[in-house]
Amino acid sequence: MKAEMLLEMVHSRRPFSLRLSDGSLIPVPHPEFILITQDGNTAVVNTAGGHIKIVDVNLVIALETNGHRTGSRRSGRR
């Protein structure tokens, strides 16, 4: 996934989830719960219970909102 697509979703101010290449889903209940590094390669998601998940953006295959997927498989890989 390209970081630009992820940033667009963050700027939409809607809840969404990251679908990773291993099939796992990481919910982002509000854009304030995610930080994308300046180089766009890493995302840090604040999850339930105050934990964080550090994600390689290249492993994000789709962004999901209300059950709809956005993105493509590995097309934006850097």
Image: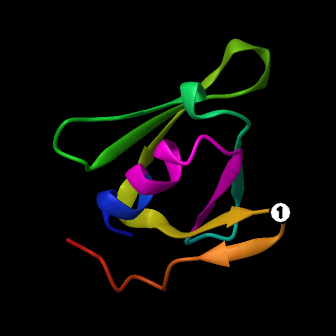
Q: Give whichever of 51, 35 is nearer the camera.
A: 35
Q: Position of residue 60 (x, y in %)?
A: 49, 64
Q: Is residue 56 left or right of residue 50?
A: left
Residue drawn 27% across the image and 35% down it: 37
Residue kind at label 1, given as amino acid type: Asn
Q: Quadrant of residue 25?
A: bottom right
Q: Residues within 10 Å of mark 1 (few under 14, many from 20)?
A: few
Indicate the secondary structure of the residue bearing disc 1: loop
Question: Does 3 appear above or below 77?
Answer: above
Image quarter hosting the C terminus: bottom left
Image quarter hosting the N terminus: bottom left
Q: Which residues are magenta?
A: 7-20
Q: Give whichever of 48, 6 is nearer the camera.
A: 6
Q: Is residue 54 left or right of residue 21?
A: left
Q: Position of residue 26 (x, y in %)?
A: 68, 48
Question: Does 45 appear above or below 26?
Answer: above
Q: Quadrant of residue 50?
A: top right
Q: Is residue 56 left or right of residue 68?
A: left
Residue drawn 69% across the image and 70% down it: 23
Q: Position of residue 34 (x, y in %)?
A: 51, 32
Q: Is residue 41 magenta?
A: no
Residue drawn 55% across the image and 72% down it: 21
Question: Which residue in the protein does label 1 denote?
Answer: 66
Question: Does 52 appear above or below 19?
Answer: above
